[in-house]
Image (cartoon, rainbow, N blue to C red):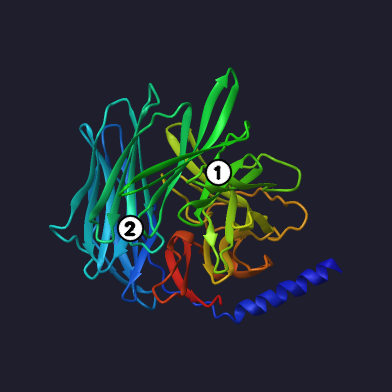
Amino acid sequence: MKKITFFYLFLLLSLFLNAQDISWTNPIKTNNAKEVVEYIGSVNDNNYFISFSNNANMFSSSLEVYFFKTNSNNELAGTSETIVFEDTEVLKAFIRDDKINLLVREYEKKSYIVELVVFDTKTLNEVKGESKVLVDFEIEKSDKVIIYYAESKDKSKYCLNYLAVDKKTSKGYLQMNVFDYDNTPLWTSKFDNDFDGTLNIHDFHIENSGEVYLYASNKIPVAKGIYDYKLVVIKNDESGGKESEFSIASDQNISSMSFHVIDSNTIFLATLKDNEINTYKLDIEKEDIISTYKFKVYDGEEDSFNWTLSKFYQLENENLVLPIENKKSMRYSGSGVSSYSFTNSEITFVILDPQDNQVISKTYISRCMNFSTSKDLSHGYFETPYYFTNGSDFYAIYNNNIALDDLVDDGINYARISDAKGSKYYHSIMLKIDDSGKPKVNKLFSMKKNKRMFSPYTSFINSNNELIISGGNVKGFSFMKYNYK
């Protein structure tokens, strides 16, 4: 009876899919298999993508970059020439008006530089005379350097934050640099790292107003093997900064954090330790913990998960969705050959009410997605989900193994199968969670039938608020417009 029920469910899904009129554009072939391709923005009914690859040997490294665009029909409309940078890495690429802005970082003698290179969206050629150095930091050989990029929700401002830490003393400084929409510097602020213990910066957040928040955790030694833990939030703007610290449980060695601003004085934080999440509603002006809440990511028997918190996604009703992914990346080396594996398995979706600091619903997704390659990529192509919201509904698109039932009521099912890209064992799924927390799963297409796997880095919401889904295979990337509403 169960087999018959499953058969009819599969048949109904197939009929539903056939009614969706899955129609792919001709594939866009990339230059080489080593490159990373990402969507960077849309303007004037055109959609823009960057492709870059790093080539390195014992003596030098180079970065190859080119751009391409698609038109309103999602067909290839232009490709730029390939530009080669020496000893350089891509930090960020984005669209502003009719310009492509490319931020690259490079080390030059005793300086660490972030440079802006500007390209025209019509010709895809570099705009001579508009490229410039945005930040230039002096560096010592013993310094560990990290550059953080964050942009506001309305994309009117962004910040480049520079952290330099002496590897021997663990002391250093942090400099925040905020820029306007047109790359004009707005303000700069510098902090010395004079915290006791080990400060772990998780990330930065910038508001539309230009206020920048740093959120971190601090591990402070008290005695041998005994530590105190604090949450640290630094709020900064052009008039100055406010540093707030909050003491938390002594066993909270935090591995991941997510951050949300409720108002100018109140923030909402989620922290992860192993399989446990703590949420905090904090008054940063009074340095007061307003409320706390604790729950498990996975309610079943614990296993060796590598849970990682995503960012919060805010719904129209002001609730927050927090995706929590079981993922990892591995590099294998032997006999002078390296290979890379990007795995993204189970996902838990939690809907939270930040005002009352409570969980509204929790949804488990059982999946197994492993993308393996011999190419040196900064991320895989097919293992990562794509998240977006519409009103008070949350959506996730991802690839999954056909042997798994996505929604699991009691525990998580396992099927450890590792296949290279193009496997017939995968299909692409859209998950919808409505404002009540009720999930619904729809199958979009399959590798076996449609010869495509969902590609998250080249899928996007265009300037007309339409969902453009990208499907990839060894021949390149194809696109289709999908009506999800």
**View extreme (left): residue:** 129
Say whether residue 245 is left or right of residue 361.
left
Amino acid type at circle 2 is Lys
Q: Name the front one of labels 2 and 1.
A: 1
Q: Nearer the viewer, residue 484 or 114?
A: 114
| Left or right placement of residue 396 versus residue 242 in this view | right
Q: Nearer the viewer, residue 109 or 229?
A: 229
Front residue of this view, candidates 435 and 416: 435
Position of the N terminus by quadrant: bottom right
Q: Position of residue 164 (x, y in %)?
A: 33, 33
Judged from this view, the residue extending furthest toward the right is 1
Q: Indicate the position of residue 253 as horizontal and vertical percent values.
A: 58, 34
Above or below, 470 against 239 in this view is below
In the displayed structure, would residue 130 be above or below residue 222?
Answer: below
**Residue 64: image location, x then y, percent:** 28, 50
Residue 314, position in %: x, y? 53, 62
**How many numbered tags mark residues here?**
2
Between 158 and 102, which is closer to the camera in this rendering?
A: 158
Question: Image point 53% across, 60% down: which residue?
Answer: 313
Density class for disc 1 (Cα within 10 Å; few <14, some 14-19, many ≥20) is some
Amino acid bearing label 1 = Asp
Mark 1 secondary-structure assignment: strand
Q: Which residue is labeled 2 in the image? A: 157
- Residue at the (21%, 68%) spot, across then down: 123
Res. 65 visible in picture: no
Q: Earlier in the sequence, mark 2 or mark 1?
A: 2
- Residue furthest to the top: 224
Q: Is residue 305 above or below residue 109?
A: below
| Occupied quadrant, residue 435 | bottom right
Residue in view at x 57 percent, y 66 percent: 395
Mark 1 — residue? Answer: 288
